[in-house]
Image (cartoon, rainbow, N blue to C red):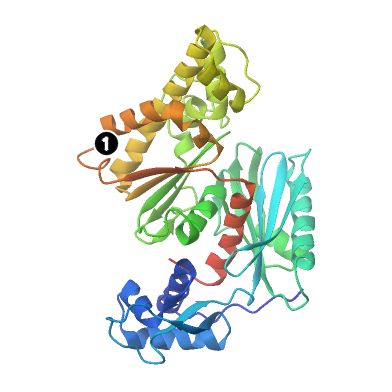
Amino acid sequence: MTVPRRVPLDGDTRTDVFATVLIKGSVSRAEIAQTLDVSPSTVTKAVKPLIDDGYLEELTGERSRARSQAPVLGRPSQRLQVNKARHAAVGIKVRPDRLIGVLTDLRTEIRDYRTVSLTDRSPGTVLGAVEELALELADGGGTADDHVLGLGVSISGHVDAAQKTCRYSALLGWHDVEIADRLHARTGLRTVVSNDVNALTVGERWFGEGRDYQTFVVITMGTGIGCGLFLNGRLFTGGFGMAGEIGHVPVQPDGPRCNCGRHGCLEAVASYDAVLRGITERGGPVCADIDMAIDLARSDDGPAGAAAVAAFSDAGDALGRALASLCNLFNPQKLILAGEGVKARGLFGPSMEAALRAHTFSSAADDCDLTSILIDDADWARGAACLVVHTELGSLA
């Protein structure tokens, strides 16, 4: 395994050029200049070292379709793409019960996928398992010529990426756990750690629903409720990595106790566990998981089904009010609902959308496109790999 030197990207223009090519797949120099609103000569100057160092490559025989655009120096119509073979990246998502790991190429296309079960959530045990999985992926996923750019680790909760530390994760029960330096010392891989939803948000910007937007928000729904903010062309994590913790915004001051220890957080009112609890509180049966709750709400016409329908509706109302706050604060162009929870949108969606419109100011709701996507374990781990490319190749848009 070869650990590469840091990529020679000096300045925002070169990193933005790389990001533009990554997002668009293949693009001409003229199209890059138009997208970034910079001069053709600026693009030419930025592209040359990226080609020389093997991060971009020209596509033989492909010509630009943008014939009406002004010519650009240096074979203007030759299309460019990211050289996916230049580097690999390892991404690992940490869940309370398992690790999900991937090895990707430089375009973060998955080349290897593995999972490891966890029976112990203690930091030592989990990080030891992360170390083993990272080395397996790095050493076993390709040829000897691969250059592993780094290791990305994503974790739920408050992660201070600058300090390379998980400050607090309610789901894992961790407080002030140093991660990146510890894993770097053990694996030899430059390691970046981040909140899992922030990692997913980078992936959505590059390859998903956020690729055409400069300001959007990702809200994840499942056992917890998370939020990633992409504002004015940049991932926003706040001063200490905690921006976007919408799951712990109080929506019911006298509400149920949350995993974080406080009462009435959105997560305690609108997550999977909240819906399951809401069904039993209304006299319905105990549901083992959210799929049983969905089936109950859709198939039972009696009191049990009504209890399930009401539980989903209440969760949707709370979520809609939280989304309204996001719209009022950040005025996003797009809201992306992601995660396992969106499979129940038909049940919580009407009350969520009604609350969103009832509590937004002026045209904030009308200006915002609301969409939902199902994501799986591989998407979470791929997001962690995106962190590596995002960090090692500069402050990418």
**Is 229 situated above or below 34?**
above
Nearer the observer, 164 or 98: 98
Direction from residue 331 to residue 10 in the image, left or right? right
**Is 43 situated above or below 215?**
below
Direction from residue 293 to residue 95 in the image, left or right? right
- Where residue 298 appears, as percent x and y from the top left, is 51, 20
Residue 107: quadrant of the picture:
bottom right
Amino acid residing under circle 1 = Thr
Total marks shown come to 1
Quadrant where the image shows the C terminus: bottom left
- State the residue at coordinates (75%, 70%): 142
**Is 57 situated above or below 177?**
below
Nearer the observer, 174 or 283: 283
* Circle 1 Cα neighbour tier, 10 Å, few/some/many (<14 / 14–19 / ≥20): many
- State the residue at coordinates (48%, 12%): 306
- Where residue 166 appears, as percent x and y from the top left, is 61, 49
Q: Mark 1 points at which residue?
A: 360
Farthest bottom residue in view: 74
Quadrant where the image shows the N terminus: bottom right
Kind of element beneath mark 1:
loop
- Where residue 299 appears, as percent x and y from the top left, is 54, 17
For the question of whether residue 24 can be seen, the reply is yes
- Where residue 72 appears, as percent x and y from the top left, is 34, 88
- State the residue at coordinates (46%, 32%): 345
For the question of whether residue 257 can be seen, the reply is no
- State the residue at coordinates (62%, 19%): 287
**Is 175 situated above or below 350?**
below
